[in-house]
Image (cartoon, rainbow, N blue to C red):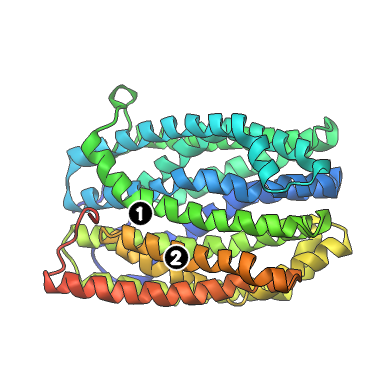
Amino acid sequence: MARQNRFEIDMLNGPLMPKLVSFSVPLMLSTALQLLFNAVDLIVVGRFAGDDCLAAVGSTTSLINLFVNVFVGTSLGVNVVCARFFAEGSHRRMNDAVHTAITTAAIAGFAMLLIGRFFARSVLTLMGTPPGIIDLSVRYMRIYFLGAPVFMVYNFGAAVLRAVGDTKRPMIFLVISGALNAGLNVLFVTVFSLNVAGVAIATVISQALSCILVIIVLKKSPEDYRLHFSKLRIKPAILKKIFAIGFPAGIQTAAINFSNVLLQSSVNSFGEFAMAGYTAANNLIGFIYAAANAVTQGCMTFTSQNAGAGKYDRVKRVLRDCLILETVFCFVIGSAAFIFSPQLLGIYSKSDVVIGYGMEVLKYTTLTYFICGYMDCFPGALRGLGHSAVPMIISIFGTVGIRILWIYGIFPHHREIDFLFVSYPVSWIITCTLQVICYIVITKRMTKSKLTPTPAET
């Protein structure tokens, strides 16, 4: 298949490892830059507005992720479906998928805007957010969700570009919007004294810019995935394929974030210093996740294209190389986060107590994070082959089930904050083991049927 622009990656021919690195590194940096939006929010409010504002922003993180990932997980379905159509040379269906994806993103974004506006206070109250910071938390969350439509359109548009191997331009867009976000944060908080409202407004403006840039690229792309506003509509058959892959992934991620909401509620019981320390540490962990998730998405996209082209001999090699990359990326970044944890946490807060709480979290999560990378890579490969439901069930049972058992069954008898975070590596090990078994069983069945991929599990 002829390549039409220099940003696409030929996933079907030649060595895999260099191309996986070329795909994953820009995506890793893009995810890290998205996290940097939140990190800059935290750093600015923590340093210039106080630990109460840091705790207020942090108390919304798990909740925002819970809502966002139900929809953003669907973008994985966009990635898989578009990659399959692109490799098959199905230009019309590829074009239909692009317009269905962008339309769906806009509708979902407005739904999230309404959820954030009307349910912020009640849900934060249920989470046990301390009365001293709940007004700040509600203010931040409501403003943040005003940007949900542009945030969703950017992520779905970037998923289309990833499907053809273009991870570089979304990274460039996030560099630009990230710089704007940082500048506006400092301006709104230090000059206009807007505290949590200022950082939320800055985030919305910067996300809008990245959305505009990705739309411009799609409007100038090759015809098979070029965006035309006049063609924006939902094709039910395409949407069904996208949701069959993406919705289980979104539910899985949302369920994991739900367990993090429960964990956040347990952290809240230790007070505002613990909340601030957990917030800072969780943001640092997010950068390790960025590396692991980039490889997982590479595994999914490369698997989907090669399955679409019928090159099943390369599918197992994709998974093998991705597991190697997970090991290297997670070990290097995780080790750095562990070794330099006092200095890194000190960026977020000047308080030794806050830093101490953050170090308790990092002690149990940084060096073991490669297990989480493996845990996500096997489901990524299965999603690329068209199987998404079973990995979702396993993740919910393994990760969420174990954490709920830990929080409500074991933690009440050992009420120490470090014991709370042992649940992370324990749940990763159990879930990873189950995902490996799932992968072996499904691929053996596919081998018996000549590895014929399915568009979705029934």
Disc 2 to disc 1, C-alpha distance: 33 Å
SS for dot 2: helix
Quadrant of the image occupied by residue 278: bottom right
User: Furthest-top residue in view?
Assistant: 230
Whether residue 184 appears in this view of the structure is no
Relative to residue 148, is residue 370 depicted above or below?
A: below
Foreground of the two, 109 or 99: 109
Relative to residue 405, is residue 96 depicted above or below?
A: above
Residue at point 77%, 49% (across, down): 55
Q: Earlier in the sequence, mark 2 or mark 1?
A: 1
Q: Please give the label number shown on residue 397.
A: 2
Tell me if 217 is positioned left or right of 421 in this view: left
Foreground of the two, 326 or 388: 388
Quadrant of the image occupied by residue 12: bottom left
Relative to residue 176, is residue 165 depicted above or below?
A: below
Residue at numbered disc 1: 165
Quarter holding the N terminus is bottom left
> Which amino acid type is shown beneath numbered disc 2?
Phe
SS for dot 1: loop
Percent x, y of residue 247: 37, 48
Tell me if 297 is positioned left or right of 196 in this view: left
Tell me if 341 is positioned left or right of 72 in this view: right
